Amino acid sequence: MSVDARPLADRARPTQVAELSGQQHVLAPGKPLAEILERGLPASMIFWGPPGTGKTTLARLIAASGDAEFIALSAVMAGVRDVRAAVDAARATQSAQGRRTVLFVDEVHRFNKAQQDAFLPFIEDGTILFVGATTENPAFALNNALLSRARVIVLKALQAADLIALYRGLADRLEPNDPVLGLTLADEQLAWLADVADGDARRFLNLIELCAQLAESDGSLGDAALSEVAEGRTARFDKGGDAFYDQISALHKAVRGSDPDASLYWLQRMLTAGCDPHYIARRVIRMASEDIGNADPRALTIALDAWQALERLGSPEGELALGQAVVFMAVAAKSNAAYTAFKAAAEDAKQGASHEVPAHLRNAPTRLAKSLGHGSGYRYPHDEPDGFAAGVDYFPPEMGRRTYYHPVPRGLELKVRDKLAALAKANAAARDDD
């Protein structure tokens, strides 16, 4: 008897809802997706979730639930010509058999705007029931016209228990002579493989299939063989994708939240997954200015030093300097006063009128400039008592004074706040005298 050569993930693909593992947040009774699958209700949709969470399987089940034809395209390979061919086939099926067609587009986020727009009229007139699959946030990866015509269903990475249940149910979906059915795994081995798969059912089934190939004649698997199966384990990470930005966001927020341990965890999650450490170095500099600022100005210096160490030592030696900098950022006094002041000043500069520079603040390098009064009345602070020209206004008179910078009562800014309060008092006294 011939053996099915397809990958285990395809051989074991569920053909009915009862065989699915996980995703109960959308498949539990009464949930919209459960209703669609139960009643075969027509609805275009987009499945958004990590790899190996059942997007393709769900699309096939939707087609089966409505007795619809199923056409699959991959945006990695397909173009507008393929979309038109699929639409023509859908029309032919509808005309000849009276059946609708589910057009499933995997990696739909890889289509550009024009390619995505090609689906719109055929979704609109009911020629196709569109089902897209994406690992990227649809709000950023897909255009609004397509999103308005399809419901977004969020899928989650599977839990270890879901993956183990998937393994336990293989006997019901595979041919009796399938080599995987001869595999015998101890509970702790199965749990370890589920952990290595990291929520990805496809990866998990690939690991199971590899275990079957390395198993002894009695179906058992030694520890050495099991370690070989999981060699090269990697965490979910997609440079430029959602996982990338979610993890750098987690790192930044852990630093802002003064948690050095969580900061190191997210730093290592990114580094071990292959993130460019120079990108992290740039973000650490941003943290130093945005979240620490003048509460501890050493943070910016340390961030720059860490980047320079990384440049000189390379990876992995230079990454230790990044770790040191991240720990410092996490435990340093926090202030976003300079950051918020910067943004507030930018808003005034963008939205306000183009006020002239007051005459006393203008440069006067020439006789003409001096004759026009440039620099007239300017008071040089170094010639004033305490190095401060009390009462001088440096804003355009049409604006009036603005206060953007509000130091916080932490770190060095505590002293800065006291200094600014004293200067404000001296300014007020000088203006009262005038």
Image: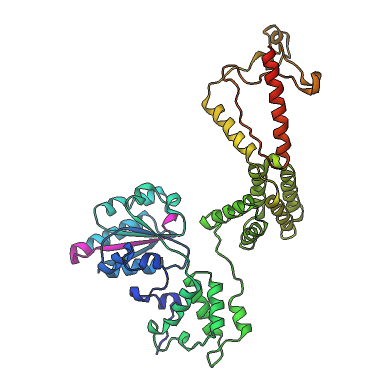
Q: Residue at x 71, y 11 (%)?
A: 377
In terms of depth relative to the viewer, which is nearer, 154 or 92? Answer: 154
* Position above or below: 210 against 125: below
In terms of depth relative to the viewer, which is nearer, 290 or 423? Answer: 423
Q: Going by the picture, which residue comes out furthest to the bottom?
A: 218
In terms of depth relative to the viewer, which is nearer, 292 or 359? Answer: 292
Residue 101 in picture, x, y percent from top left: 27, 63
Q: Residue at x 35, y 62 (%)?
A: 104
Q: Is residue 237 magenta?
A: no
Query: Quick check: can you spot residue 362?
Result: no
Residue 83 in picture, x, y percent from top left: 34, 57
Residue 426 in picture, x, y percent from top left: 72, 22
Count the numbered circles shown.
0
Report the side of 270 relative to 165 (left or right): right
In terms of depth relative to the viewer, which is nearer, 96 or 235? Answer: 235
Q: Is residue 97 magenta?
A: yes
Report the side of 237 relative to 169 (left or right): right
Which stretch appears magenta?
93-109
* Position above or below: 10 against 366: below
* Position above or below: 408 against 386: below
Q: Residue at x 59, y 30 (%)?
A: 345
Q: Quadrant of the C terminus?
A: top right
Q: Residue at x 19, y 64 (%)?
A: 98
Q: Quadrant of the N terminus?
A: bottom left
Residue 324 in picture, x, y percent from top left: 73, 55
